[in-house]
Amino acid sequence: MRLRNLVRINPSKSEVSCLPPTTEVTFAPMEAIADGLGGLDTSLSRTIEEVGSGSYSYFADGDILLAKVTPCFENGKKALAKGLRNGNGFATSEVHVIRPGKEKIDPVFLTYLLSSQEFRAAGMASMTGAGGLRRVSESAILDFRISITDISTQQTIAAFLDRETARIDQLIAKKERMIRRLAEKRAVVVSLRVTGLVANGSELVETNSPFLPRVPRHWQLSKLKHGILRIEQGWSPECEARLAEDGEWGVLKVGCVNFGQFRDSEHKALPNQLAPRPSLEIRVGDLLMSRANTSELVGSVALVKQVRTNLMLCDKLYRIVVDEGKLNAKFLHFVLNDRYVRRQIESECSGASQSMQNLSQAFVKELEVAIPSIDEQIQIATRCQQISDGIATLLMAIERSIDRLRELRSALITAAVTGQIDVATWGERGETDRRLEKIEHELAAEQTGG
């Protein structure tokens, strides 16, 4: 049976025309809708007069919101609406509102069905539009075939999936906490070295800096400008919304520098009619800083360890060129990402817009950094890299384990809502337990090198 026989799609906002214009309703921008199995943040509200005449999508308690635009659809953004302000809401126009027919289909089962691999594949195959604005049509939803139509069976499957996916989600949450703790441990251990607090018992002396009160006696607290040659800024021409092909020039996006890591896949192709600027080409060993970004990411620094050819610096990034007789680039990479430098950046950015903040070259040059001799910088950078690499190996193993758990969750949902498994016997046989144990054993083997 097709879903068009079981649901309505995109109900009319005229349903709330009888309510006073000042009535508050839930407001749901795309950010309020969760990825994966979904969920809805109902804390935002607007009055009907604020949102009723716009292009927002109307919905009510019991409706399902489904993101229709890429990449939100692929990310699984959806929500079964519950507990809405005065029972109603308005959402971004980039969602389809699906209303389950009473006594025709179970809403929770339908939500799981919309998370199944088959539905996601059908939706992606039906997308129309260009670039990043491809959308799933109403007909792709309405024409989707459902194999389990008995309400009682749907409710049994929904209860089974509620139970089993909750167990998987708890394990995913546990592993995500492990990732956070490991990342915090790496930051602390590296910080102790780049601030000299682990410096072979060297005597610490007081400074006048509120950001770094003590340093080893033989270190120097100095302005960054005394150890660098220059700061370069790139350009941002109007680029094409695609990656550069082999031999083509491209321009980096600001997202290429993210929490200390560099990703050359974050770029756009330079149009053929524009001449490249070879002096801005990125090279291995470059030290890049995010000049303009969110409060969390502005000032983030990455060391380029590998990069494809013909990629240029964009204007939202700085390239910091060090004086190699005074500063080691690898050492400075760890320093500029340390907490005492981050506190300086946060102090500069306080009170500014949270969506986009900017660091001037003058401010960057005035950053206070603690500097030992070149030989000691190299030793510290080498040790910090060893620590980072070791923890990164553990983090990758845990992330792969999380991916496996998400794959298991997705496969389980698909198998249940399409009738490929008998949910009663699945639970009796302990199939979920066995599969979870296998993933845990594989993770343990990776962590021990076995």
Image (tube, rainbow, N blue to C red):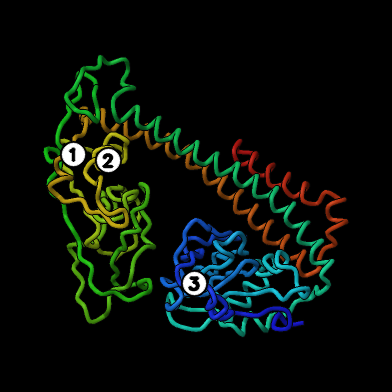
Is residue 205 at all visible to an observer of this figure?
yes
CA–CA distance in space, label 3 to label 1? 56 Å
Name the image quarter holding residue 198.
top left
**Image coords of residue 346 (percent x, y):** 27, 42
**Image coords of residue 335 (percent x, y):** 28, 37
Q: Nearer the viewer, mark 3 or mark 1?
A: 3
Regarding mark 1 in the picture, which secondary structure is present there?
Answer: loop
**Residue picked out by circle 2:** 336
**Image coords of residue 392 (percent x, y):** 47, 42
Tell which circle, 1 or 2, labels the residue nearer the N-terminal end: 2
**Residue picked out by circle 3:** 20
**Would residue 362 be found to the left or right of residue 203 on screen?**
left
User: Could you tell me which quadrant the C terminus lies in?
Assistant: top right
**Would residue 87 be found to the left or right of residue 410 on screen?**
left
**Image coords of residue 259 (percent x, y):** 37, 48
Give 315 or 343, whichever is nearer the viewer.
343
**In this rendering, is residue 374 above or below 430?**
above
Please report contact status of discs 1 and 2: CB closer than 8 Å, yes or no. Answer: yes
Residue at x 68%, y 47% (from the top left corner): 439
**Residue picked out by circle 1:** 367
Which amino acid type is marked by label 2?
A: Leu
Name the image quarter holding residue 221.
top left
